[in-house]
Image (tube, rainbow, N blue to C red):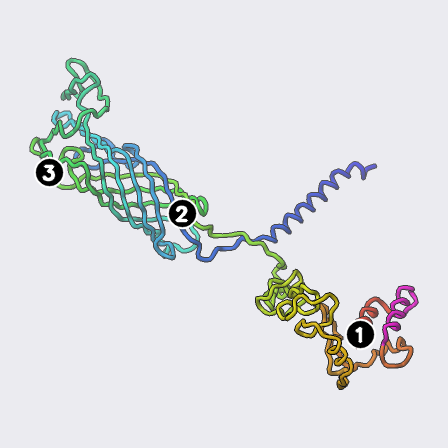
Amino acid sequence: MRLYKFLPVIVLVLCAQIAFAQGGYEDLLYQEVEVENPVYMPVLGIGAGIINYYGELQNDFNGLIQGSPSYRINVFQYIDSKHFLKVNLNATIGSITGYERSFTDITKNNNFKSEILTFGVNVEYSFGNIYKGERKIIPFISFGGEFISNIRSKTDVEDASGGLYVYYPDGTIRVGDRIVTRDYDYETNLIDVNPNGLDTKDFKTSSYAIVADLGFDLKVSDRVALRLASSLHYTGTDALDGDSKNNTIGEKGNALKDMFSFTYVSLNIDLFSESKTKIIENLFADVSGDFDYTLIADDDRDGILNLVDNCLETPVGVPVDSVGCPYDDDKDGVPNYIDKEQFSNKGAIVDEFGAELSANKIRESLYQELPAVERTELYMVPVGMGWSKYSEMTNVEIPQKYKKLDKDGDEYISFDELLDAISGFFDFDSEYNTEDIYDLNNFFFAQ
């Protein structure tokens, strides 16, 4: 009774063991291998970040992660075989904002916002020759340039009702007799206000920038990576904020061009490249590692493995059947590729080229005198892979243990004598074991 209580547990354990063994064996039948010279296609990256401005209008904050939100799309392609270098093509859309606030000089209370669209290209280096091998974190540095289009600089000088902001030394902003705060609407074109008296030619609608980018990629998988980086953009204009060294009103700006940084996070996804690894099935293989490759040899290259090829020396290019033998449509024993008469009559006697023999030819062959052939000059051609140790035809002497089977004393084991030995074995009236009977059978066919 106790055994019946534990029977479900025993069955469950046995099933688990069988499933584990089967799963482990199936795992051995498949192997993950590296692909030699995989084809790499362009990789797509989509990201978002913060633009922070560095110019005459100094913000209260200068941190890399503070500023205006912007968005980028990037495509890169490796340009060297070792994947140390890549070329990036990107487009960024966003805005640059800045302001200055002064309690002592009420003319120094300016602000601006420039909507921009950039198109850039750069060459990136990932230190692959220094940090070798597989890396989860990949640092990089890049240098390039970009075209800044669609520059539209505006300023916020009015409230929602159209009243002008007036900045007071006590730090308040007023419209008429009302104390207000800015609405950050940036409703007025900066060139129309021109607070520093710049030449209108200084206000450009497009420009260029020299770009340096620094960061690292965090490898999530072979096809996905997360990029954290920050880039510095030194532009070719000094009038994004309407303040430069060319000011004709108030204090002149510095001689440097306007700059901004872009700190961003992007997700790079490789959708189109060939996989770096592939799963192969170990067909016919001994998964223990000690594999005999002769099992999958095909010496005559007919598509049939030697193991099951009944015609091992088929000429190259000759069509074969499922057992590797050339087709013989008329079944005359001569394969099609050498058969001169491929439609011989059924049962007809043919020569070595498949030509049907006439009655006279057959009669002549029966009566021709041919010298006898010594047994020692013959050898046996086996069918398929059925070789035995007695395959060569020799005048071997009957082994001592089988001599008693030669009842007529002619030094030859006849077919009847072989049958008698086999019958005695199955009637349990024989001194021979199974191996002896197999050995006797081989000897009989090799005589």
Mark 3 and mark 2 residues within 8 Å of each other at the beta carbon? no
Judge depth for marks 1 and 3 and give the one in front. 1
Q: Secondary structure at mark 3?
A: loop
- For mark 1, what is the residue? 443
- Counting from the top left corner in percent of width and height, residue 282 is at 59, 56
Mark 3 closeness class: few <14, some 14–19, many ≥20 residues within 10 Å: some
Residue 111 in the image: state x and y as whole percent: 19, 28
Residue annotated with mark 2: 137
Q: Amino acid at mark 2?
A: Ile
Is 284 left or right of 106, judged from the image as shown? right
Picture disc at residue 245: 3
**Segment tinted magenta in the rendering:** 413-430
Q: Main secondary structure of the magenta part?
A: helix
Q: CA distance from mark 3 to mark 2?
A: 44 Å
Q: Residues within 10 Å of mark 2 (few under 14, many from 20)?
A: some
Q: Per the image, is 144 magenta?
A: no
Helix or strand or loop: what does disc 2 sit on?
A: strand
Does residue 110 lie above or below 355 as drawn? above
In the rendered image, residue 418 lying in the magenta stretch gets the answer yes
What is the distance, in whole Å, between disc 1 and disc 3 at their CAs?
111 Å
Disc 1 residue crowd, few under 14, some 14–19, many 20+, Cα 10 Å: some
Q: In front: 213, or 377?
A: 377
Which x, y percent locates residue 171?
A: 17, 21
64 lies left or right of 283 = left
The residue located at (16%, 29%) in the rendering is: 190
Numbered mark located on residue 366 in the image = none
Q: Looking at this rendering, what residue extends furthest in the left direction?
A: 248
State the residue in front, 8 or 78.
78
Residue at 25% of width from left, 42% of height from top? Answer: 232
